[in-house]
Image (spheres, grey):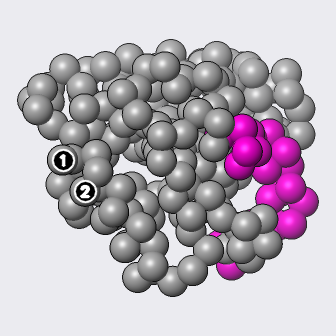
Amino acid sequence: MYLGLSGGIGCGKSTVAKMFGDLGAIVIDADAIAKEVLEPGQVGYESVIHAFGESVLDSSGQIDRKKLAEIVFQDQSQLAKLEAIVHPAVIARVAEIRESLPETAVVIYDTPLLVEKQLQNQFDQVLIVVSDASVRKERLLARGLESSDIEARIANQATDDQRADVAHFVIVNNGTLQELRENVTKVWQQISA
């Protein structure tokens, strides 16, 4: 079974993905792969430098994701340019991973842009994590993001209602980790039955 997992920034999607992994799912993390394809020597690295210049590099020659984010989340055309580099590379890497897995595996593809990129039809079922906006902002501020950066990122993402429209399961994450674990376990019991 191939499941898509998504949710807005700060909703706890990565925590939910880890919980599904603990229950036996194989989790493919789109963000981790996106970072991987931008490492020196990887397919996206030279393309990003060519597109955005060496000013996006840190002192060690790595792509400075914070600098790059400041550029792309303030300008839709720059975001589109980055996505045109990263997304094909991620898609190719995910295909490689999936081909290596047994057909009986429950695979969860953890991606923040499932709805924005209209990927829902690629999956057997879609799992969406939602949290109240105030909870999300509090979590993101605690991670060290600036309020203006949080607002820019949220503005570039689908709304919870748009996500819920494509969801087979909506996992609400406004409470404790234990409450979240119970919600995830209930969904797992239904999808792995």
Q: Amino acid at mark 1?
A: Ala
User: Residue at position x 63%, y 32% from top?
Assistant: 115
Q: Which residue is mark 2?
A: 189
Drawn side of residue 159 relative to residue 107, left or right:
right
Query: Residue 105 or 80: which is nearer the viewer?
Result: 105
In this view, 85 is above or below 188: above
Where on the picture, by quarter, is residue 4?
top left
Where on the picture, by quarter, is residue 159?
top right
User: Residue at position x 18%, y 54% from top?
Assistant: 24
Q: Which residue is mark 1?
A: 193
In this view, 60 is above or below 122: below
Query: Residue 154 or 62: which is nearer the viewer?
Result: 154
Find residue 19 and report its horizontal and vertical position in percent.
33, 64
Q: Are marks 1 and 2 in contact (CB under 8 Å)?
A: yes
Give the extent of the magenta segment.
Answer: 142-163
Q: Amino acid at mark 2?
A: Gln
User: Residue at position x 80%, y 59% from top?
Assistant: 150
